[in-house]
Amino acid sequence: MPVAVAATPPADWRSQVFAGTLLIVPQVAPLTAFRAYVEQLLDEAFAPSAPPAAQDELAAADFMARIEQLRTWLRGDAHARQLLIPVLAHFGLEPSTTFWDRLNVRVLPAGARPQHEADLALGAHRDTWSSNVYAQVNWWLPLYPVTAERAVAFYPRHWDTPVPNDSGGWDLDQLRRERREGAAPTVPLVPSPTGTVDPSDAVAVVIQPGDLLLFSGAHLHATVPNTSGVPRFSVEIRTVALDDVRAGRGAPNVDGAAPRVPWNWFRRVDDRTPLSDVLA
Ligand SMILES: [Fe+2]
């Protein structure tokens, strides 16, 4: 698997990511303040339990409700986003030309405990089946130690091998409309493979708190079902650099068929202008 470990981000890191490299940057110093802030929020959310122990000390519904409250808070938290700007700068990205979507904290309980849909262990998927943006870079960071039993997995064989999927009929607007109307959803939560993906192709990537994993949104990846006994806490962001979109740079599309590109999912870091407005 093309994994690159770099103490500092290479100048051409986005080209490498668009070629399928999984880029690990260990112990990213500018990430420290953000991590401390989110860990403090987690401590407060689960007090008096320590976050890794909370799933054993709280009722399942209470555990899930506290995660959901934290997730909602973080999505609207300008301070958390502000703390990520030095991290973007470390990778040469400027707030005026970089776009991102939701800042997402995910907590994957161990075992068969109930999960909120936003925390579900996702099966094999490419983010680009839904976002349709091939310049999308995913940033993944754990908040507590990770093991191979609670990690993220990739299917390197499928970087350039098509996987039959239902992205051609997936529509987020329709999904949201159906939910608003209380109708039974006819659109799945996320586009999925329509056949079987050989699980033996999956390779778990294990990094530790302070490390960052960057990968193309076109990589086939999955949540490793958590059999470790301890919940997995992670944060995800997804960025798009305007220069890449304008220059047509990005990962190859081997099997995505989403009917349109929802550029409006991504907003400019400095003033929240939707990417769709900038490209219009
Ligand atoms: Fe994903």
Image (cartoon, rainbow, N blue to C red):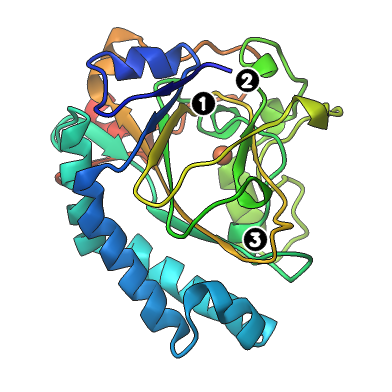
Displayed-image quarter of ligand 1: top right
**Residue at which label 3 appears:** 117
Residue sitting at the far right? 196
Along the viewing direction, whichever of 157 and 267 lies nearer the viewer:
157
Contact, CB < 8 Å: mark 2 with mark 1? yes
Please identify the quarter of the rendering in which residue 221 is found. top right
Left or right relative to 46: residue 243:
left
Q: CA distance from mark 2 to mark 1?
A: 7 Å
- Of helix, strand and loop, which one carries label 3? helix
Amino acid at circle 1: Asn
Amino acid at circle 3: Glu
Which tag is nearer the camera, tag 2 or tag 3? 3
Q: CA distance from mark 2 to mark 3?
A: 23 Å
- Of helix, strand and loop, which one carries label 2? loop
Q: Position of residue 116 (x, y in %)?
A: 64, 66
Left or right relative to 182: residue 91:
left
Amino acid at circle 2: Gly
Q: CA distance from mark 1 to mark 3?
A: 22 Å
Q: Earlier in the sequence, mark 2 or mark 3?
A: 3
Left or right relative to 58: residue 105:
left
Q: Is mark 1 within 8 Å of ligand 1?
A: no
Q: Position of residue 209 (x, y in %)?
A: 40, 52
Determine the residue positioned at 65% across, 81% down. 56
Q: Earlier in the sequence, mark 2 or mark 1?
A: 1
**Residue at which label 2 appears:** 256
Q: Earlier in the sequence, mark 1 or mark 3?
A: 3
- Of helix, strand and loop, which one carries label 1? loop
**Residue at which label 1 appears:** 132
Determine the residue positioned at 20% across, 63% down. 79
